[in-house]
Image (cartoon, rainbow, N blue to C red):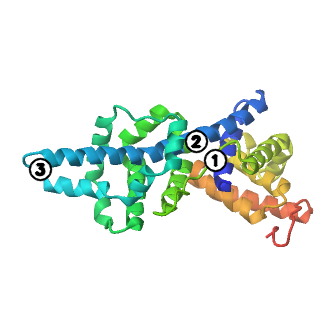
Amino acid sequence: MLNRRFLRIKTFQALYAWNKDKDSNKTLYESNLFKSLDKTYELYIFLLSFAIEFSFFINKELEAQHTKHIPKSDLINLLKVFDKNLAMKELAGSPRLDAEIKALKIKWNGNTIFFRNIFNELKESEIFSKFNSANIEDDKAILIAIYEQLVAQSDLFNSFVEERYIAWEDDMTLTILTLQKTIANIKTDSDNFLIKFSASDSEDIKFMKHLFRQTIENEEELTKLIAIKTQNWDTDRIASVDMMLMKMTISEILYFSEIPVKVSINEYMEIAKLYSSPNSFGFINGILDKIQLDLREQNKINKLGRGLLE
C-alpha cells in the first residue's frame, strides 16, 4: 500500500487533466490515472538502476586508473568512495530489483559518456566532504545526496531522464521521495526494500477511484461550496490548480468517512506547496477552514470513529 499523498497527487494530476476538457470521456482519464501509476513505477525502477549502472562505470574507471603508468591518486580515492558504497552494492546484488529491471526491459547500453559527465559533475560538488563512508548508513546518506544533487542541479541528468519519461517533471517529487525511502530502508541482510506500486493493489486503486469519481460526480456541489466563501472573487479567475485542490479536499471531507478532517486539509495544503503559487497557500487554507466549519454546523460531515472530526 502506497503513501496516501502519492495517491492524492496522482489523482490530482488526472483530475486536473480532465478539468481542461470536461466534455471528454472521464473513463479515459480514470484509465490513464492507473496507467500513469505503472509508468511512475517504471521510472522509479529506472532511477534505482542508475545507481547500479553508475557503480559498474566507477568500477571500470577504477580498473583503468590502476593500469595507467602514472595513476591519479586523488581520482582513485574518489572513485573508491563510489566503488565501496555498500548501498550501491546492495542494489546491485538484489535479485528482486534485478528481476524488475529485466521485466521492464531497462537497459543502459552505450551510455559511458553520460556516466563520465555525471561523475565529473559530482566530483566538483561538496557531497563527499559532508559524509564519511564508514558504514552502510553513511553510504545510504551519500547515495541519497547524489540523487538530490543530480535532480536539483544537473541539467544533463534531468534531460536524460525526461527524454525517456515525458512525465518526469510532474512525477519528479513523487519518485524522488519514494527513492529516498527505498534507500533508507536498505539493509545488508534483507532484499525487502523495494516499494511496489501498481494498478494491482486493490486498496490503492479503491482510494484513487473513489476520490476521482466523487470529485467529478459532485463537482457542481463542490463548486457552490467554494463560491459561497469566495463571493468577492470571480471563481473563473481562481487558479484552476487551487480550485481542484479545494474540490478534492472537500470531497475527501464529505465522502471519506475514515479520514480525519485535519488530515485531509493538511495533506492538500502540502500538495498546494508543490503545485500552487506561494500566495495561494493562505487563500486555500482560509477558504477550506471556513467551508469545513460550515459543514460541521450543518452536520454534513460524517466520520466513523472518535476523533476523526478533529
Q: Which mark is residue 71?
A: 3
Which image quarter is the C terminus in?
bottom right
Residue 230 in the image: above or below residue 19: below
Q: Position of residue 92 (x, y in %)?
A: 42, 50
Alpha carbon distance from label 2 to label 1: 9 Å
Circles 2 and 1: CB distance less than 8 Å?
yes
- Which residue type carries mark 2? Thr
Circles 2 and 3: CB distance less than 8 Å?
no
Q: Which residue is at 29% across, 47% downward?
A: 58
Q: Which residue is at 78% across, 63% downward?
A: 261
Residue 283 in the image: above or below residue 163: below
Q: Which mark is residue 255?
A: none
Does label 1 or label 3 sit earlier along the sequence?
3
Q: Secondary structure at mark 3?
A: loop
Q: Nearer the viewer, residue 237 or 140?
A: 140
- Which residue type carries mark 1? Phe
Q: Position of residue 206 (x, y in %)?
A: 78, 47
- Which residue type carries mark 3? Pro
**Residue position for label 1:** 197
**Residue position for label 2:** 40
Q: Which residue is at 33% across, 69% downward?
A: 134
Q: Position of residue 227 (x, y in %)?
A: 80, 48
Q: Nearer the viewer, mark 2 or mark 1?
A: 1
Q: Which residue is at 34% across, 31% downward?
A: 110
Alpha carbon distance from label 2 to label 3: 42 Å
